[in-house]
Image (cartoon, rainbow, N blue to C red):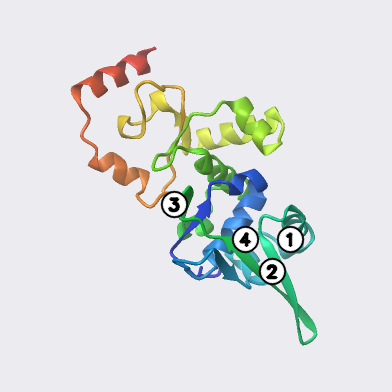
Amino acid sequence: MRPTVKRYTIIPNEACKHFKGKDLYLLAGLYINAPYERDGEYMVTDTTFDQLAATTGVKVEYIRSYFIPKLKIDGYIRCETQQAGYKKRNTYYLPNPKSNYKVIKAGLFTDNTLTDEEKGIVIGLYCMCVNNTFACGLSDKYIYNYWGISKNTFKKYRNQLMEKGILCIAKQAPTALTWTEKPEDYILMYPYIGHISYQDVISKHKPTLEEHCNYNLHRSA
């Protein structure tokens, strides 16, 4: 894998309206390779197909023939193409929000425990989480309709992430990550998302007696 430009990047919550699965993962690859931009409206990168492939592990042919055409048609990311000698070079203008974004860490791109599609599902679910939490309270139906995928496709990836211990139901998760009144929320437990990791949230949390009681009550339900 090619080293990323940054140790972490932000990605807008609304990105998951436009991309899903492997394509959302590739979009995150563009973001992680775009230099930091504190005040600008956009982060800008001219990452090549080969560089994006080296960052993400996705084949160049998929990037060239499927991802980039989708990106251009969608229009959420502005793409300008310039001729450089005998070659063309794309420049991507990535929305750089000041709020309603999530943090993705570089370790996601070298993690070989998840497939490209699974990484995209994790990013998409995280973008749907309440800000500053790892909790997603949306229904399965809402999520798969929002992404425009089939119920069975969503269930397949949801179950795979659950089997890998990255996704669970709130009543099965540590109390630090949950709200007691929402025991059926999805909770993400993945080390490469969030400015503060879920492990740090858990380690710093001091549960109250009420939280202990509610947690035990929901687990026994």
Give the left or right position of residue 203, taking residue 181 as reference: left
Identified at 35% across, 34% down, the residue is: 177
- Of the residues under marks 4 and 2, which one precedes in the sequence? 2
Quadrant, the C terminus? top left
x and y percentages locating residue 11 in the rendered image: 52, 54
Q: Quadrant of residue 140?
A: top right
- Of the residues under marks 1 and 4, which one precedes in the sequence? 4
Residue denoted by label 1 = 68
Quadrant, the N terminus? bottom right
Residue denoted by label 4 = 57
Residue denoted by label 2 = 49
| Label 1 to label 4: alpha-carbon separation | 16 Å
- Report the mark closest to the observer, 3 or 1: 1
Task: Tell me the kind of residue under disc 3.
Answer: Tyr
Task: Tell me the kind of residue under disc 1.
Answer: Ile
- Of the residues under marks 2 and 3, which one precedes in the sequence? 2
Task: Tell me the kind of residue under disc 4.
Answer: Gly
Give the left or right position of residue 170, taking residue 91 as reference: left
Identified at 75% across, 54% down, the residue is: 70
Q: Which sits in the foreground, 162 or 210?
A: 210
Residue denoted by label 3 = 192
| Label 2 to label 3: alpha-carbon separation | 24 Å
- Of the residues under marks 3 and 1, which one precedes in the sequence? 1
Name above or below for residue 153 compared with residue 51. Answer: above
**From this viewpoint, which residue is outermost toward the top?**
221
